[in-house]
Amino acid sequence: MLNQKQIKKFEDNFLAPYAMKSRNTRGRAYEEPEHHYRSPYQRDRDRIIHSAAFRRLEYKTQVFVNHEGDYYRTRLTHTIEVSQIARTIAFALRLNIDLTEAIALAHDLGHTPFGHSGEEALNELMADSGGFNHNLHGLRVVDILEHRYSDFPGLNLTWEVREGIVKHSSEFDRAGRLAEFIPEEMPTLETQIVDIADEIAYDNHDIDDGLTSGLLKESDLERLPIWKNIYGALLKKYHAMNPERKKYLIIRSLIDTQVTDLIEETERSIRSVKPKSHQDIKLLDTKIVSFSPKIQALKKPLRALLSDKLYHHYRVVRMSNKAKRFITELFLLYTDKPQALPPDVQKRIPHDGVKRVVCDYIAGMTDRYALDEYKKLFDPYEKV
């Protein structure tokens, strides 16, 4: 049986010198004895998977509201896809797979119902009370709002996983920075990998969901060089493909092309800076996990197309506006009448204040629960 000594020896022998090894963890806010046969980051991963916030991701949406259909990605399926892509990259670069997986599984725990429209609504409503950011709220979830242990609040995750949650960033994120996590330092390579894996996953599953919904047309994608290149290569191999299989083959190849390019470009960057430890990565003035200039150029029109044809499609805009109205009206009712909140939620008001408690409560809702609450509170014929 592997014990802690053997786990650390395995990491020393297998992981690259610049990987974040568990022996170098800054530890937990509340000290705990090490587990007999799990590394600290494996333990974090398991705590995240067993959390209520992780389970609720099943009914929180990406682009399409949950009741639009069972096929579309949810935050949970997206998270699993991000984790799979991030693990592949981490393994190829000899980084800490357990840390990478834990950060990937936790990266969306702070998201609201109804995707980014829910976050925008809460940020506006909380403008005079510190605002709302899903990365910072994710940290609040794992530090405070999860109640599973008698010895400490939250999940008591390691410093490195918590840093990965706070310093996670993508095009959509406006991540806040906390002094505890040394804002001037770069995140670990494991965190940087999750950032890009997130981008790869949502670009490609949004293509899939967009085509399935009919909001995206294949004729739109056929004008893109990256799509044409991959389709041309597949035609040489398969000659003929039915439309459904064609879509899957192209999306699979898109992911593989981007992951391979990312690994190769990042490896070149690592060889260039010659880091000898994880701390050398942190002291750099820029992130080094990135695509090559060629792939970045090919991805740019793809992302512009998704923004124009999918994210700003009139049906998505309508869903977004409805979602913001649901969030806003729930928030205003709860803050005006906090007695309408469940008793266990009301108990936190003296410590955190009405607005923050209401914000926490709404942010923790699934799409389905938020819609049910809305009907109960505003439909006169609905039982409360």
Image (cartoon, grey):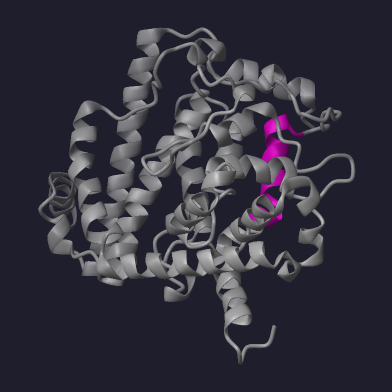
Q: Residue at x 25, y 71 (%)?
A: 214
* Span colored in magenta: 38-53
Measuring from the top left, give residue 101's x and y in whole percent.
Answer: 57, 39
Q: Residue furthest bottom?
A: 381
* Quadrant of the rendering where the C terminus is positioned: bottom right
Q: Quadrant of the N terminus?
A: top right
Q: Which of 365/273 is in front?
A: 365
* Residue 222, placed above or below residue 70: above
Q: Residue at x 56, y 34 (%)?
A: 166
Q: Is residue 64 left or right of residue 353?
A: left
Q: In percent of the image, x 60 and y 29: which residue is there?
A: 163
In depth, the one of 3 and 75 nearer the eye is 75
Give the mark count: 0
Q: Quadrant of residue 209?
A: bottom left
Name the residue furthest right.
150
Residue 291: horizontal and vertical position, in percent?
A: 30, 30
Residue 160: x and y in percent read 63, 27
The answer to if 45 sits in the magenta stretch is: yes
Q: Is residue 40 magenta?
A: yes
Vertical order, 8 against 370 (above or below):
above
Q: Is residue 105 visible?
A: no
Residue 294 spot, x, y in % from top left? 19, 30
Asked whether, in this view, residue 314 is left or right of residue 11, the answer is left
Pick the front one: 365 or 346: 346
